[in-house]
Amino acid sequence: MTSTVTSSITEIVLPGAVEPDGLELRTRDLPAPVKGQVVLRMDATGVSFAEQQMRRGTYYDQPPFPFVPGYDLVGTVTAVGPEVDAALVGRRFAAVTKTGAWASHLLIDAADLMPVPDEVDAAAAETVLVNGVTAWQMLHRVAKVRTGGTIVVLGANGGVGSTLVQLARHAGITVIGTASERHHATVRALGASPVDYRDPHMYDRIRELAPDGVDAVFDHVGGAGVEQSWRLLRRGGALVSYGSAATKDNEGNSQVPVLKLFARLTAWNSLPNGKSAQFYNFWAGKRRCRTSWQQRMNEDLTQVLRLVADGVLIPQIAAKIQLSDAASAMTLAESRTVAGKIIIVPEA
């Protein structure tokens, strides 16, 4: 198949700490791919919590403004650079970018491409890309919860949370999931026992459901509530923290809340009570050995996509919105009125 080089592309630029309607739609020329690169046409990307923090300037290690957001995408290779197999052209792949995916086309290192099976469509694969790998690794690589265990998933209606619930239930694990009351039917349908996160006695409600404690708590909220998450654990249990949603609107240095959280988790790990506390970092190990990190990513995404193809894992797609209307996608994602992930797709 012949490579097609796209010179003019459309992308969404985050110019500064702006409201969603401050996102800018720009057109620019895309350079030809250099050695080891491909041009990937975006078939689906999405809005993650990372972008919501980035627009406020509060994501832990975001680049300086202005930049193109977009944590991950699924797309089709349209051109290859020197020393890249031309057979990749026309094939669909997933890639994790951290930034840059909110664009019609982008340059990607061929080594970072992860194949997507033909039987899984782009939007479904995008929904479980970072969310699915995050959930899989936290459940099976970090907490290592066994069949018959009980876990708590905070935000069980969200992108990571809804995936975690499904993976856990498939593994024979009992799940208690927090969500607003409007999402309780969804959480129940996924296989979890819902608890209202707005209930001031939420943690007491969880204890009523698991009076002997739980084997793991997956906490993306952080803040003061993380101590309550720690107290829910039985001996041998694991607290897996993977975010600081409670502090996303805080003013000042975005790294301070995360560093405080790290310090608290480290202190708990030194206690002689058999419990563990860890902060899950999706990018952990990449700087040390990019090859092994990418291999682990490929392995885990393959497992997740196989479950999607088999109908075991149902991607929770809240809405599909065109790239040019990314402001609406961001607004909807931040409204906390939807269950699942907001997917951004190319122009019709």
Image (tube, helix red, strand yellow):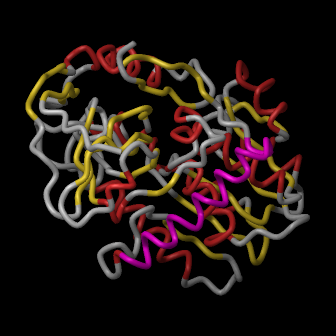
- Is 312 left, or right, of 97 in this rendering? right
- Is 26 left, or right, of 266 in this rendering? left
Above-or-below relation of 240 to 322: below
Of 234 and 184, the residue lying toward us:
184
Question: Residue 275: x, y in percent?
Answer: 68, 76
| Residue under the image location 48 percent in, 73 percent down | 295
Of 78 and 300, the residue lying toward us:
78
Is residue 250 shown to the viewer in this render? no
How many marks can you see? 0
Does residue 211 show up magenta in the picture? no
Of 346 and 56, the residue lying toward us:
346
Is residue 33 shown to the viewer in this render? yes
- For this orientation, the residue located farthest to the front is 1
| Residue under the image location 8 percent in, 32 percent down | 29
Does residue 310 show up magenta in the picture? yes
Question: Residue 300: x, y in percent?
Answer: 59, 64
Question: Residue 222: x, y in percent?
Answer: 49, 51
| Residue under the image location 24 percent in, 38 percent down | 4
- Is 64 left, or right, of 103 in this rendering? left
Which quadrant of the view contains residue 2?
top left
Above-or-below relation of 228 to 237: above
Question: Residue 318: x, y in percent?
Answer: 59, 23
Above-or-below relation of 5 to 10: below
Q: Which residues are magenta?
A: 291-313
Quadrant location, the C terminus: top left
Quadrant location, the N terminus: top left
Which quadrant of the view contains residue 47?
top left
Of 98 and 78, the residue lying toward us:
78
Above-or-below relation of 329 to 62: above
- Is 305 left, or right, of 249 in this rendering? right
